[in-house]
Image: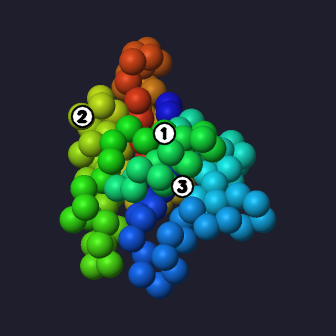
Amino acid sequence: MKSICFIGARGGSKGVPQKNIRLINGKPLIAHTIISALDSGLYDHVVVSTEDKKIAQIAKKYGAEIPFLRPKNLSTDTAGFTDVMIHGINELKKLNYTLFFLKELKMLNIFVTNFISFKDGNTPSTERYMFILF
């Protein structure tokens, strides 16, 4: 099963303008987040949701995927992360990801075991999976 780290990074921060591309220890802030996610070994894909082309370019440089750009209305001070996630989920569905939602980490083992049993261990390689833990 494939797992995804979903990172929201908008370009229009008013508190700290362009914070996601500001250098910290020689790298843009967003790069540290991406590198940490990739180095953790927990994720097969690191996806960044942004409306900003410069953030997208930097995110790709550091190994993240940008399968879509976020609309401007979800990149404002008042846009909530829930709406950003819903947009991301809908976009990933269009790209043939299969999405499962788990409420607790301890459910993951039970769910995966049951899913594999249900699929008889023959999960098609063309399917992609995302587990969102909340």
Observer-side mark, 3 or 1, equals: 1
Q: Earlier in the sequence, mark 2 or mark 3?
A: 2
Q: Amino acid at mark 2?
A: Lys
Observer-side mark, 2 or 3, equals: 2
Q: Which mark is residue 106?
A: 3
Name above or below for residue 121 compared with residue 59: above
Q: How is the image coloured?
A: rainbow
Q: Amino acid at mark 1?
A: Glu
Neighbour tally class for label 1: few under 14, some 14-19, many 20 plus, Cα within 10 Å: some
Q: Amino acid at mark 3?
A: Lys
The foreground one among 10 and 90 is 10
Neighbour tally class for label 2: few under 14, some 14-19, many 20 plus, Cα within 10 Å: few
Q: Residue furthest bottom?
A: 15
Q: Earlier in the sequence, mark 2 or mark 1?
A: 1
Disc 1 element? loop
CA–CA distance in space, label 2 to label 1: 15 Å
- Return the residue at label 2: 94
- Return the residue at label 1: 65
Which residue is rendered at x = 44% and y = 17% of the image? 125
Residue 69 horizontal/vertical position (percent): 33, 47
Toward which corner of the image does residue 74 lie, by quadrant?
Answer: bottom left
Residue 108 seen in render: no
